[in-house]
Image (cartoon, rainbow, N blue to C red):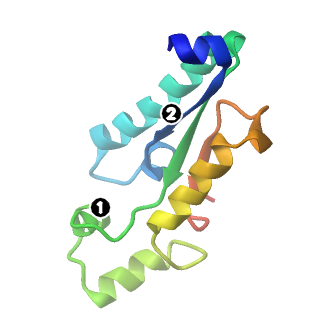
């Protein structure tokens, strides 16, 4: 923090869309993701005077070993189609999607953006 307090900067927290659009059966998991969002906003209030920006990136789930758990069903082609039908752009998040959002939020182009939770979700949270 001393470096950031001296120069300003940008901090990014990665959480998930369930922090703003909860899924059934995951109450405490959803809550933990929402806590990251509110903690980030609280940091904005504390660190903003030192020109330190804090933002969140909220991706929709990606293809990982936990996919069945997040879908709350077995990862079969039929079940995956059902879940993808809830994402208007029809796909899971990819690492490059999250990296692009991080690069954008950390860039000088966003020097007046702080305290947001950017959904990288193909429209799932709409």
**As drawn, 38 above or below 3:** below
Residue located at (53% from left, 72% from top): 87
Residue located at (27% from left, 51% from top): 25
**As drawn, 7 above or below 67:** above
What numbered label is drawn on residue 37? 2
State the image coordinates of residue 1 (x, y, percent, origin top left). 50, 14
Count neighbours of disc 2 (C-alpha within 10 A) and say few if under 14, some if 14 to 19, many if 20 or more: many
* Circle 1: element type: helix
Q: Nearer the viewer, residue 103 or 44?
A: 103
Residue located at (61% from left, 65% from top): 123
Q: How many marks?
A: 2
Count neighbours of disc 1 (C-alpha within 10 A) and say few if under 14, some if 14 to 19, many if 20 or more: some
* Circle 2: element type: helix
Q: Distance of mark 2 from mark 1, alpha carbons?
A: 19 Å
The answer to whether the residues at label 2 and label 1 have Cβ atoms under 8 Å apart is: no
Q: Nearer the viewer, residue 77 or 56?
A: 56
Residue located at (70% from left, 43% from top): 107
State the image coordinates of residue 11 (x, y, percent, origin top left). 55, 31
**As drawn, 89 above or below 97:** below
Q: Quadrant of the C terminus?
A: bottom right
- Who comes first in sequence, dot 2 or dot 1? 2
Report whether residue 111 is seen. yes
Relative side of 82 to 119, left or right: left
Question: Where on the picture, by quarter, is residue 50?
Answer: top right
Q: Nearer the viewer, residue 92 or 3?
A: 3
Residue assigned mark 1: 70
What numbered label is drawn on residue 36? none
Report whether residue 125 is seen. no
**As drawn, 6 above or below 69:** above
State the image coordinates of residue 55 (x, y, percent, origin top left). 59, 35
Q: Nearer the viewer, mark 2 or mark 1?
A: 2
Residue furthest to the bottom in view is 77
């Amino acid at each position: 923090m001393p470096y950031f307090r001296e120069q300003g900067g940008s901090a990014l927290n990665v959480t998930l869309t369930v922090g703003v659009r909860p899924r059934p059966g995951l109450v405490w998991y959803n809550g933990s993701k929402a806590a990251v969002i509110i903690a980030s906003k609280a940091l904005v209030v504390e660190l903003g005077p030192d020109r330190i920006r804090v933002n969140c990136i909220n991706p929709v789930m990606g293809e990982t070993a936990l996919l069945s758990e997040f879908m709350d069903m077995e990862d079969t082609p039929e079940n995956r189609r059902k879940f993808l039908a809830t994402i208007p752009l029809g796909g899971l998040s990819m690492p490059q999607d999250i990296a692009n959002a991080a690069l954008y939020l950390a860039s000088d182009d966003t020097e007046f953006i702080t305290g947001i939770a950017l959904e990288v979700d193909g429209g799932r949270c709409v």
